[in-house]
Each structure stands twice: as structure tokens, then as C-alpha cells.
Amino acid sequence: MTTLKELSKLLNLSVSTVSKALNDSHEISDKTKKRVHELAAKLNYKPNRIAQQLKSNRTKTIGVILPTVTNPFFAEVLHGIETEATKNNYDIIVCLSDEHLDKEERSLELLSNGSVDGFIMAVARESQVKSKTEHLEKTLNQGLPIVLFDRVVKSISCDKVIVDDFKSVYEATKYLIDKEERKEILLISNIEELSVGKLRTKGYKTAMSEAGLKPRVLNLGQSPDVEAEVYNNLSNYPEIDAVVSIDHITGIVAINMARKLGRAVPEELSVIGFGYEHTQLVSSPKISIIHQKAYAIGEMAMKTIIANLTLEAYEVKTQVVPSELKLSESTKKA
């Protein structure tokens, strides 16, 4: 394997000059940079990553802790994180909490031993339900930055990347009330105990209250039979004329159960769900969604932690990635 010293000898340049050229330093002329990069490519030169890490006291590796990857939202966020990491010559190590506090704690402890420079994570369901934050505070006190996304903890002083959960559902509900003149709107949720679920429900209830309408909320929790719960609710309350789902599954379930009951979507029942663009490919009719822009959230989270690690003057902040109401066939005025 070609070394930096061998490159410098072949180019008749100092090791320092070759190193700076490879790192595109402004101190080196474009002509010299070109010579160095061309020979490095020809000889398949690879920098000694371990030596670089020892010198900079950085691993250039970020720990990513996700509740799950079976939820397409988190998979798409991960895609955004990985793409942005690659652009900036960072690596990632991914751990799954499986929604459990103890697994989240173990992942933080395992990677806090010098394996990573910081963390990007969405808090596990159990951590939020039990309001456990000590493991996050311990990690921050070790000098390791954390960027929380989607499910965040207000009391923790760290970077956060979110969508405006309240506003997105408020506006979707307002659309059904104002544009489609729906009055019996059902909100369906299986994330009511999470921070995002509470904010989305609050947005719905606020829009309903402002319109003088009575809220209807179906909290599914961890129900083993979501289809039966939704079917029974739509069957028992035929006056329901619209559904707002605040997770990525139950909106599609509502469409399927409405069809099973012989109710036309969107003529008799409008449905708006939460999700990502490909969600519309797995329902018939195609579901209108609040698009969370998960990929952009992942990109923003990675950019944020790199800035935290590299900028001398840096202050933690909360950044909002705007969501978008994408209308399709499950609403009347698509």
C-alpha cells in the first residue's frame, strides 16, 4: 500500500505539502493539488484513517440510535443521515433500541467509549413513557453531542431537528373543515403517549375547537388488532365523514376498513394520513398525506452534528423541517 511518504518522494514534495494538497488546503496551488490527486488516484493511495483519528482526536464516526427500521419514516431518515455522512467523509454506526429504554441505554454506553464523536437519535417509546433522560444527560456530560430528531425531550439541552407536529395536523384538519366542509372528523392514533403524538393530537383538537366541532379521538395504543378497532369505530359511528391519522399505518387501515363497510372514499369519507411520498403507492385510492420529509430530517441532523463538532463558536438549537400536505385521491379536492 502506498504511503504518504512514498507519494511525497515520487512527487519531489514535502510530506506536509502532499498532505495539505490531499486535504484541499488553500495554501497549496491548484496545479500542485492536481498533480498530487492524480498520482494518489493512480497508485490507489488511501489515507491512514487510524493515524488521522489519533492526530485529530476524532473518529469521524457518528452513532445513530433508532427505535426501529421497520417504520419507513426511520428508514428514510437513516438514508438521509448516511448520504450526508458520506458526503462529509463520516461513517455511522447504527443501533436499534426496539423501543426499549435498556437497549437505548446500552447503545449509548457501548458507543461512548471512544467509538463515536456524537449521536443522532430518536428517543425510544419506553424512554418517553417513563420520562427517563438520565442516560442522555450522562452522555452530554461526557462531552459527546446529541442531535435528537422527531421524538425529542424538551428538558434536554441539545440540538433538535423536528417537524412542526402541531401545525401540520392543525392545517390538515382545517383543510377538511374549510375546504371539504367535513364536520365529524375522527383522529386515529397509535402513538398517543409519544411527544409527537401529543402535539399532533393537540393540533387536531385546536382546529376542531376553533370551528365549534366536537373532537373524536380513537387511541389505539398497542392494540393487537388495529383493523378491528378501526372497523368497529367506523361501523358504530356512520356519521364520521373524515379521518385524520397521525401515524404512518392507520390512515391506510381506515381506507381499507371504509371500503369493507361499503363507504366510498373520498365521496363519503375523506382520509388524510401521516407519511412519506411512497405511502401513496400502497393504498387504493391513493392516500393524501402530511409528508414529513424524513430524508431532509436525516440530512439536517447530520449537518447539525458536523457543525457542532467542527465550528468553534456553536450554540445548540432546534431546527424545523417544514412538512407538506400532499393531497391525492382520498380527499375530494385533490
Image (cartoon, helix red, strand yellow):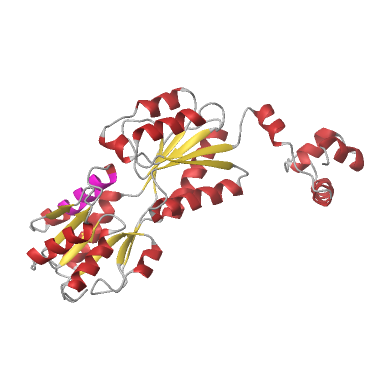
Q: Position of residue 208 (x, y in %)?
A: 13, 56
Q: Position of residue 22 (x, y in %)?
A: 76, 42
Q: Quadrant of the C terminus?
A: bottom left
Give the extent of the magenta segment: 196-206
Examine the image and state in which quarter residue 5 appears: top right
Q: Position of residue 171 (x, y in %)?
A: 24, 58
Q: Position of residue 116 (x, y in %)?
A: 55, 33
Residue drawn at (24%, 60%), measured in percent from left and top?
172
Q: Quadrant of the N terminus?
A: top right
Q: Main secondary structure of the magenta part?
A: helix
Examine the image and state in which quarter residue 265 appears: bottom left
Does residue 271 sit above or below 246 in this rendering?
below
Does residue 100 sit above or below 36 in this rendering?
above
Does residue 27 sit above or below 263 in this rendering?
above
Does residue 324 sit above or below 96 in this rendering?
below
Magenta run includes residue 200: yes
Residue drawn at (27%, 43%), measured in percent from left and top?
194
Front-lying residue, 313 or 305: 305
